[in-house]
Amino acid sequence: GQNIDQPTEMTATEGAIVQINCTYQTSGFNGLFWYQQHAGEAPTFLSYNVLDGLEEKGRFSSFLSRSKGYSYLLLKELQMKDSASYLCAGHVRGSARQLTFGSGTQLTVLP
Amino acid sequence: GAVVSQHPSRVICKSGTSVKIECRSLDFQATTMFWYRQFPKQSLMLMATSNEGSKATYEQGVEKDKFLINHASLTLSTLTVTSAHPEDSSFYICSARPPIQGANTGELFFGEGSRLTVL
């Protein structure tokens, strides 16, 4: 199958930096998305990487290495509102529109 | 960004009844929409791909006769949970991707989700 793996839970302190890793099978996907999902709400788009390298967007950055099947989401200057589940999602190769989601990483930001 | 609207946001029904959930793309036409299901503390699992004007494509293990999908227009897809049982209680989320143009990365936009509770 086309597995996407990410840690189940992470905890960090307000103001700190946290990196959430995601690994996937390299033969399966064309690009990696990151979504944020607060409890009881729908996911919201954070970033999309299709080429290798780092994409920076304010406090959030996302990195992709296609050869290693590896991506990470970097959150800087953590705020309490960043406590949420972060979903790594692969754009399925050969499919124009389908995404396959990882299990999500539940981030808890402590004061 | 693009807007996808889902209704109702919450529904409680008795076991054995049917429930319809609507998903609308408000500012773009979507020939394809996706229906996901999410159980507590789990990720989104794709149930089916809804195709305008043709039959939906269901993922393995999803009963097409139980989860009826109709994509009657370019802006509306409906999911009907027939003869609902308590194990069908879940968070159902629809999504769609507008055509890729300019800076649009082609990301999926999600509806607000519908929380179904079957008593």
Image (cartoon, rainbow, N blue to C red):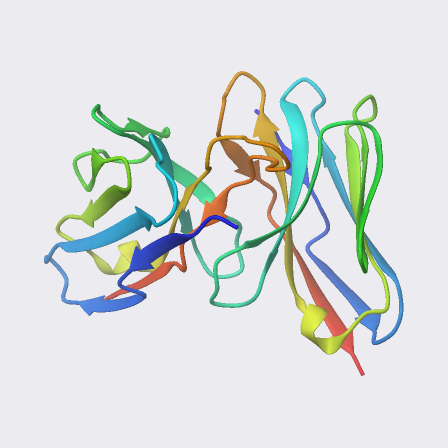
Residue B16 picture location, percent across and down:
10, 57
Residue B52, can we see it?
yes
Q: Is residue B81 above or below residue A77?
A: above
Say which of B21 and B52 sits in front. Answer: B52
Q: Is residue A15 above or below residue B110?
A: below
Say which of B44 and B50 sits in front. Answer: B50
Residue A58 picture location, percent across and down:
80, 57
Residue A95 picture location, percent across and down:
50, 21
Q: Where the C terminus of chain A falls, by quadrant?
A: bottom right
Left/right placement of residue B44 relative to residue B6 reads right
Q: Where the N terminus of chain A falls, by quadrant?
A: top right
Left/right placement of residue B55 relative to residue A29 reads left
Which of the 4 image quadrants contains residue B106? top right
Residue lying at the far front of the rendered structure: B102
What residue lies at 53% left-to-right and 60% top-to-bottom? B41
Say which of B107 and A34 sits in front. Answer: B107
Residue B119, can we see it?
no
Q: Is residue B74 above or below residue A1?
A: below
Residue lying at the far right of the rendered structure: A16
What residue lies at 78% left-to-right and 78% top-to-bottom? A110
What residue lies at 14% left-to-right and 48% top-to-bottom? B82
Say which of B19 and B33 sits in front. Answer: B33
Which of the 4 image quadrants contains residue A33? top right
Residue lying at the far left of the rendered structure: B17
